[in-house]
Amino acid sequence: MFEREISEKRVLGALELGDTIEDYSSEMPEPSRLLLGFQGKRPIHVVASENPETKEITIITVYIPDSDKWNKDFKSRRA
């Protein structure tokens, strides 16, 4: 996230208010999900893993979605 110049504030905003656009719960040891948030008008994707027992959230990655791979809403992948 630092290399991509995405602020901690925006990542936290995505965790709190972002839309869950993909659920990876069955693929990983801890429930994980892909969230859509925004840094100004720029969309960001946050992949986070949540441990329900400790109530800890681990940020796996944060990136700017590629418009060639995502539809205009950045919520669904292009076919």
Image (cartoon, rainbow, N blue to C red):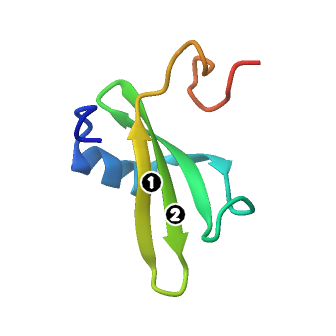
The residue under label 1 is 60
Q: Amino acid at mark 1?
A: Ile
The image quarter in which residue 44 lies:
top left
Residue occupied by mark 2: 49
Q: Position of residue 26 (x, y in %)?
A: 75, 62
Q: Nearer the viewer, residue 29 or 25?
A: 29
The reply to whether dot 1 and dot 2 touch (C-beta < 8 Å) is yes
Residue in view at x 77 percent, y 18 percent: 79
- Mark 2 is surrounded, within 10 Å at the Cα level, by few (under 14), some (14 to 19) or many (20 or more) other residues, namely many
Q: Quadrant of residue 31?
A: bottom right
Residue at figure coordinates x 29%, y 44% from the top left: 10
Amino acid at pointer 2? Ser
| Mark 1 crowdedness (10 Å alpha carbons): few <14, some 14-19, many ≥20 | few
User: On the picture, is 73 further left or further right than 10?
Assistant: right
Residue 33 position (above or below residue 6) = below
Residue located 69% across and 62% down the image:
25
How far is the residue under mark 1 from the one under mark 2? 7 Å
- Left/right placement of residue 42 relative to residue 29 reads left
* Spot occupied by residue 4 in the image (x, y as percentages of width and height): 28, 31
Name the residue at 59% across, 60% down: 32
SS for dot 1:
strand
Please indicate whether residue 5 sits to the left or right of residue 49 in the image: left
| Relative image position of residue 14 (x, y in whole percent) | 41, 48
> Which mark, residue 24?
none
Which of the two discs, 1 and 2, labels the residue nearer the N terminus?
2
In the displayed structure, would residue 79 be above or below residue 59? above
* Of residues 78 and 2, the one drawn nearer to the viewer in this rendering: 2
- In the picture, which quadrant includes the N terminus? top left
